[in-house]
Image (spheres, rainbow, N blue to C red):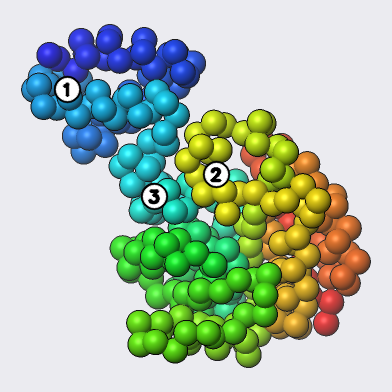
Amino acid sequence: MLVQHYRNIIVPLLTEAFDEREAENLFKYVMEDYFKKRYYDVKEFSLGDDEVEELNFIYEKISNHYPVQYIFNKAHFYGLELYVDENVLIPRPETEELVDWIIKDNQENNLSLLDIGTGSGCIAVAVKKNKPGWNVFALDISEEALKVAKKNARDNEVAVEFIKDDILKSPRSTDDSPQQEDVSRGQWAVDSGLYNIIVSNPPYILNSEQDQMSSSAVQFEPHLALFVKNNNPLLFYDRIAEYSLSHLTPNGKLYFELNEFNANEVRNLIEQKGFKNIVIRKDLAGKERMLCCQNKI
């Protein structure tokens, strides 16, 4: 069967779950990743029975809203290719905008940065790749997420110190086993160090907002990294801001990714804690999704 004939079977099936344009794009994306070639170069290919069977399985998962990034364990972020699986969020374009702000806003060559809730490591790895002279640290509570982040650092040939800890508790090293040596060094830095920059894309979506999200995110992406309890939506912002007051250098900067629906509440929280020069930026879609402020010291 030619790829073009196969397309005439699959795209109509995908349109049962997606609009026609997205269905077409998904078909092409899968074919390009499957064959590691441009769609223009594969559309005349003849598919064998085994290939059709494998592709049918992939498209069936996609039609059930399983993220294509998890199927191929790949996501593109700020010019990098990252490994992703169900232990980490799929990096979003607005997070790329946050990284771009950090990189362009800080021209010094020897700064230190801590990424809290690193997940796939997308922020930490992208910053380190573009700022090789910086000392970059990345913290997450999930051991499985840290495995993914470490792989992304290795694959992209950057040195990032990874820390396993819960930012809602006082960061401290609790495991002295040999395999945790790199984590212990990182936690020492978190305990005693001062950072020029702290950044976080924390859980900020209320449990009650799940029905406003895509079904693929709700079904398959880690809830630990997405959702916060309805009765305390600013929990992580509050804890990270409080931590930053004593762990940022004088005039050090704190960056947050925001939930567009409570951006002003985060601003008020930050202001009450005494941070200065608070700036909220809109993303390319015109939504208030990023915040930067400076330590009050």
Camera-side residue of 7 and 61: 61
Secondary structure type for disc 3 = loop
Q: Position of residue 86 (x, y in %)?
A: 42, 48
Give the number of the mark in front: 2 or 1. 1
Q: Tell me which label, 3 or 2, sits earlier in the chain.
A: 3
> Spatial distance from mark 3 to mark 2, Cα to Cα?
18 Å
Circle 1 crowding by C-alpha within 10 Å: few under 14, some 14–19, many from 20: some
- Residue tagged by mark 2? 93
Q: Tell me which label, 2 or 1, sits earlier in the chain.
A: 1
Camera-side residue of 201 and 60: 60
Give the residue at x 38% y 28%.
62
In which image quadrant can residue 195 be found?
A: bottom right
- Compared to residue 244, the image places residue 283 above or below, namely above
Give the residue at x 27% y 10%.
9
- Compared to residue 200, the image places residue 174 above or below, namely below
One can see residue 263 in this view = no
Q: Tell me which label, 3 or 1, sits earlier in the chain.
A: 1
Which disc, if any, is residue 85?
3
Which disc, if any, is residue 83?
none
**Image check: 239 left or right of 14?**
right
Q: Position of residue 259 (x, y in %)?
A: 72, 46
Camera-side residue of 103 and 174: 174
Circle 3 crowding by C-alpha within 10 Å: few under 14, some 14–19, many from 20: many
Camera-side residue of 92 and 134: 92
**Image check: 233 left or right of 53?**
right
Question: Split into 4 quadrants, where in the image is the N terminus?
Answer: top left
> Spatial distance from mark 2 to mark 1, Cα to Cα?
32 Å
